[in-house]
Amino acid sequence: MDRILLSTNYPNLFGLALHKLMPEKASELFTDESYFIRTFKNQLSSIVIDSDINECPKSTSSIKDINIFIFTQIFKMFKKLEYFKFNPFDGSHYDRLTFCESRPNILSSTLLVLRVVVDCYEDCLYLLDGRFNQLNTIYVTICSSKVPTLPVVNNKKKLPNLKCFSITQRFVLSVYNNILIPQLHRMSNLEELSLYFDSLNAEIIDGYNLEKNILDYMTELKKFKFNIRSITPFENQVNLPSNNDIQNTFKNFKNSKIISYIDGFPQLNQFHCHIYSYPYSLTHYNYITNNFRGGLFKHVCKISLVDERPFEHEFFLQIAKSFPFVRELRI
């Protein structure tokens, strides 16, 4: 990489993507006095940093510090930055990018698009507290289910410039009503919204819920994609809905195809309701049960199966038909 960057001048270079970058090399590259910074800090408007967690040394004790350092340096040094994608180094869950401890003073009046993977929902709130006042697109992946401590984050002002918001929660989301919904109400000018999460909640998220809590507040919305699984205890449901009941709640989603199916897990004392927009855009499909509705999922390469009832031969034939490009299967 050094040979390429130092071999000649690149006066027309405005974007740079660094893939499989190692932590030590990254911290060296983004120091204040590095040749890379001196040469490109007033030139680059697009930066992609994509680490390879499989090659990340497990013995590196300061990966979390390196993540914060790089993220901070990017905004400190590159004053024309408009697009930034950061897939941080992640040797373990202790190393994830998080702003909960240090609270770095990061600001940008030029950033338009941000794609980032962070540790918890509080990190997402930090990014949405107004420090990027021209931001119009943000894709956030959240790795843990830690509950935010809201008093330390100011997140009440409207975000009028935000046009596209996508949030993916890898673990269970437990703050749908009290945190996620109020944050979405700040984004009244959204044109694209993507929600991907499992919700541990007392209520079932269905079409009526999405209309009442989200869509009624977003008059400019043109595209809404989602993959939501509600997980609720049986005792919280007096009259459990049928799948037809759930499907009927989407009668006002005229221009969208919505798939739903329900599952009961008596041994776990859980009722599951899975709803998603189709075509399905994710690369994984988790917790497939015997009630799987079928369909074609060309982008999915990882699936997992779970049920308290045994899977029959016909079920696996349907799985093979629906997921022709699957490379990983967990049961």
Image (cartoon, rainbow, N blue to C red):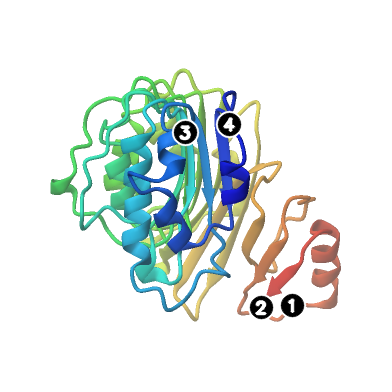
Looking at the picture, tell me which residue is in the foreground, 153 or 75.
Answer: 75
Left or right relative to 157: residue 112: right
Number of the front mark, 2 or 1: 2
Tag 4 residue: 9
Q: Are marks 2 and 1 in contact (CB under 8 Å)?
A: yes
Where residue 136 sits: x, y (%)?
Answer: 43, 25
Quadrant occupied by the C terminus:
bottom right
Residue type indicated by callout 3: Phe
Mark 2 neighbour density, 10 Å: few (under 14) some (14–19) many (20 or more): few
Cα distance between the residues tagged 4 and 1:
61 Å
Tag 3 residue: 40
The answer to which quarter of the image holds residue 37 is top left
Q: Earlier in the sequence, mark 2 or mark 1?
A: 1
Q: Are marks 4 and 3 in contact (CB under 8 Å)?
A: no
Q: Earlier in the sequence, mark 4 or mark 2?
A: 4
**Residue under the point 46% across and 34% down:** 39
Tag 2 residue: 331
Where residue 46 sits: x, y (%)?
Answer: 51, 32
Tag 1 residue: 311
